[in-house]
Image: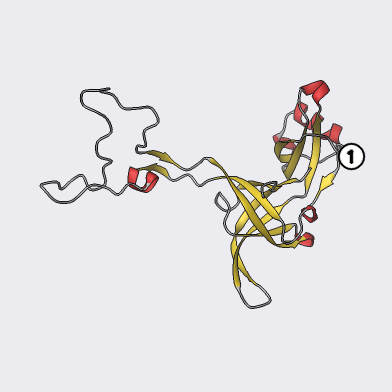
Amino acid sequence: METLIGKKLGMSRIFEEDGTAVPVTVIEAGPCSIVAIRTTEKHGYNAYQLGYGHRRESLYNKPDMGQFKAAGVSPIRYLREVRVDELSELKVGDIIKVDLFKQGQKVDVVGTSRGLGFAGVMKRWHFSGGKATHGQSDRMRAPGSIGQASYPARVFRGHKMAGRMGGETKTVIGLRVARVIPEENLILIQGSVPGKANSLVKIKMSTRK
C-alpha cells in the first residue's frame, strides 16, 4: 500500500542547490495506523482502513473503542479506507510513516477544496460578463441568455450558472516530492494542493506517466 493520510499545514518555499526558490506545500503525513483490513472473501473488496490523529477516549462510544482495542491502537480521530488490488504483508496494528515516500517521486494528492459560498458566473465559471453600453447598466456580471425562446423553450440540465462554489473533492496529479523530513513526519510537495490549512489530505503514489 502506497498511501498516507495527513494534514495540510500551509505553504512555504525551499531553495535548491543552484539557488532556485521552489514553492512547496507542507503536509504532516502520518504516522497512520492500520485499524482494519477488508478482504474480498468477507467484504467483497480488498482495502486497508487507515487511522490518523488522536482523540480522547471519552468522545467515543463502546463499539468504537472496542474496534480500537481489538486493533491495539489508541483512539484515532480520522478513519479512511484505501482500496488495493492485492493485500500485502501489512497487518492490523502496523504503523506507516512518511518515509514511505522519497524525494523526487511523483504523487497524487486528494483534498477538499476551500468552500467559497455562493458565487456568480464570472467568479465560478470565468464568464466574461455583459457589455456596459447600448442602454445596459445592470447586466455587467450577469450570465446572459440561458435558454431558447421557442424551441426547446427550456434550460438544459447542467447549464453553468451561479451557485455554491468550492467544498468539493479534488485530486492534483503528478506533484513532485521536494523534501521528506521523517523525524518531524513532514513531507514538502512542490506546488499547491487542494484545501485550506489544517484540512485533511490523502497522498498516494502516482501511477500516471
Q: Which residue is mark 1?
A: 89
Give the structural element (helix, strand or loop) at label 1. loop
Q: Residue at x 72, y 61 (%)?
A: 104
Q: Is residue 56 left or right of residue 152?
A: right
Along the line of sight, the residue nearer the viewer: 75 or 58: 75
Query: Is 65 placed above or below 181 here?
Result: above
Amino acid on which the number 1 mark rests in the picture? Glu
Query: Is 29 placed above or below 155 here?
Result: below
Q: Residue at x 37, y 37 (%)?
A: 160
Residue 114 in picture, x, y percent from top left:
50, 47
Identify the image quadrant of residue 112.
top right
Number of disc labels: 1
Query: Is 150 placed above or below 180 here?
Result: above
Residue 121 in picture, x, y percent from top left:
34, 43
User: Considering the image in quadrants, where does the N terminus appear?
Assistant: top right
Q: Residue at x 30, y 49 (%)?
A: 128
The residue at the far front in this view is: 209
Identify the image quadrant of residue 105.
bottom right
Q: Residue at x 63, y 48 (%)?
A: 109
Along the line of sight, the residue nearer the viewer: 37 or 84: 84
Along the line of sight, the residue nearer the viewer: 59 or 190: 190
Residue 156 in picture, x, y percent from top left:
34, 27
Q: Is residue 109 left or right of residue 105?
A: left
Along the line of sight, the residue nearer the viewer: 71 or 15: 15
Identify the image quadrant of residue 40.
top right
The residue at the far bottom in this view is: 18
Q: Residues within 10 Å of mark 1 (few under 14, many from 20)?
A: few
Q: How is the image coloured?
A: secondary structure
Residue 123 in picture, x, y percent from top left:
37, 48
